[in-house]
Image (spheres, coloured by chain):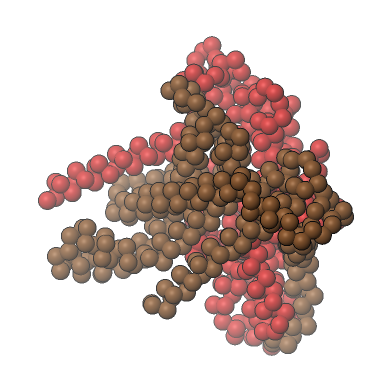
Amino acid sequence: MKTRENIARKIVFVILCILAIAWIYPVFMILINSLKGETFISTSSVFQLPNAKSFTGLNNYTNALSSKGFAAAFGYSLIITLTSDVLILVGTSMCAWYITRVNNFLSKLCYALFVFSMVVPFQMLMFTLSSTADRLDLDTPFNICIIYLGFGAGLAVFMFTGFMKSIPLEIEEAAMIDGCNPIQTFFQIVLPILKPTLISVAILETMWLWNDYLLPYLVLDRKKYMTIPILIQYFRGSYGHVEMGPMMACIMMTVLPIIIMYICLQKYIIKGVIAGAVKG
Amino acid sequence: MEKAIRRYWPIFVLPTLAAFCIGFIYPFVQGLYLSFCKFTTIKKATFNGIDNYAYAIQDSGFWHSFWFTALFTVVSTVLINVIAFAIALALTSKIKGSNVFRTVFFMPNLIGGIVLGYIWQILLNCALSLLQKPLLALNATYGFIGLIILMCWQQIGYMMIIYIAGLQSIPDDYIEAAKIDGATNRQVLFRIKIPNVMPSITICTFLTITNGFKLFDQNLALTGGEPAHASEMLALDIYNTFYSRTGPQWKGYGQAKAVIFCIMVIIISMIQLKFTKSREVQQ
């Protein structure tokens, strides 16, 4: 009985190992090909490791950084993600506090609308949203965060209100009696208590913002600003001949920071995902 | 206290609400209105009743993409949930290196749809050409299978995390008690574990359904709807109706399709809400 269980356990372990290799392999394949010279990347040799002849070192990477606009795209993606994240966290947590603590028509209406907005697919508003953004001059990476605050508010408000309901009122009342006004109470008392939820929401929103393609593609002025997903899409779409080497280097440079961040912040990311799933 | 906070609504609510009006409410209402109009830009919109809807319902491309999406959603939901649950079971059974496996399986979730799509397009096209089969963009069946593989690769880790959390929340006493009563492993699985993770199963099922139904980035990057719109899913069909056709009528059609699409997604969410609510009552 014991040995049978041991054998079963070993079989499961081997299957998991095979799956894990299948999970890593696509990224590994991009890595090895990004180190090959342009002429050596072909459908028949894509699975081979680079050899002395095809190895070009980091040429593809320098090429992608210098002439393919990768650095700028990376910068714009970073700006958009950071500003939108900060704005969403501050704006929606304040709004969520009002919604949970004040019981009037405004807060009920807001809550219902926010929850509704989580369900609506982006295709429903893509045309009107991009023309609205155009008219209000919200088409640069520096102020697209306002659009993101509006469009991404639903999930964040939902998660914050879910958590705030469990914070005891007494703490805030005590602060108010001691002379805090609501703004002080919020920033000095409520926000520190919210920290775990803030991290969860930040992670969920970052995963969305960093990878979002269609919204920035339609809203941003494409001739001037490209984010990473737009750049990679552009690589394939508009040139007659796709330069595979620099493209693979771009993909690698997009994926690597994410993987490094993931390995460092794994605990929080997984917690955030579970929190988001249970609430959503 | 409530009164004190209430006076501060312009500070607490107004900024988010204003952005929400710009980013959601106004475009939504306008989109709803434009679905009854013929337009190329918003200023030049003329009301034309339900013509757009009549066209959208008769459009064979729309129906094709609907069935393609529906089939994709069903197949991917079943595959992803079964495999993710199996992996979660394996990883909660005190196996060596379960943390490493968990890390590896979850990783693809953090990579965006466009990038994932291209990685797999390169990989699958090379594999297909070595096998001397038609490329993804030339054969809708391979495109479909490719999309399924891609979605499994991306989503299994996510669902696995939720299942692991569900399985770990089952008290050990339940399983021990069942074992003492002589339950086999199979009985423990079907009588104890699965009933106790039903909430996770509901969540994951609906997450995969909505993800499959709303899929856009991966579809665009992996097959781009080729060949001849045959592997186009609903979201991409709407996008193409909007942006890759010229003519004054297409944007109205696209908007009408988008409204229909939106209603479908809302219906799925309502069913989900009902499921989660009814389960809460039982507990």
Query: A61 or B257, which lies in front?
Result: B257
x and y percentages locating residue A91 in the rendered image: 72, 66
Does B99 sit left or right of B57 as displayed?
Answer: left
Does A95 sit left or right of A271 as displayed?
Answer: right
Reply above or below: B283 against A3. below
Outermost residue toward the left in this view: A1
Which chain is painted in brown? B
| Residue at image location 42% in from the left, 79% down from the top | B281
Query: A154 or A61, which lies in front?
Result: A154
| Residue at image location 52% in from the left, 27% down from the top | B135
| Residue at image location 70% in from the left, 34% down from the top | A234
x and y percentages locating residue B189 in the rendered image: 26, 60
Number of numbered markers: 0
The colour with which the image depicts chain A is: red
x and y percentages locating residue A213 in the rendered image: 67, 45
Quadrant of the rendered image containing residue B46: bottom right
x and y percentages locating residue A64 in the rendered image: 68, 28
Does B101 sit left or right of B177 as displayed?
Answer: right
Residue B26 visible in the displayed image: yes
Does B212 sit left or right of B44 as displayed?
Answer: left
Query: A235 or B46, which lies in front?
Result: B46
Residue A93 visible in the displayed image: no
Reply above or below: A166 against B141. below
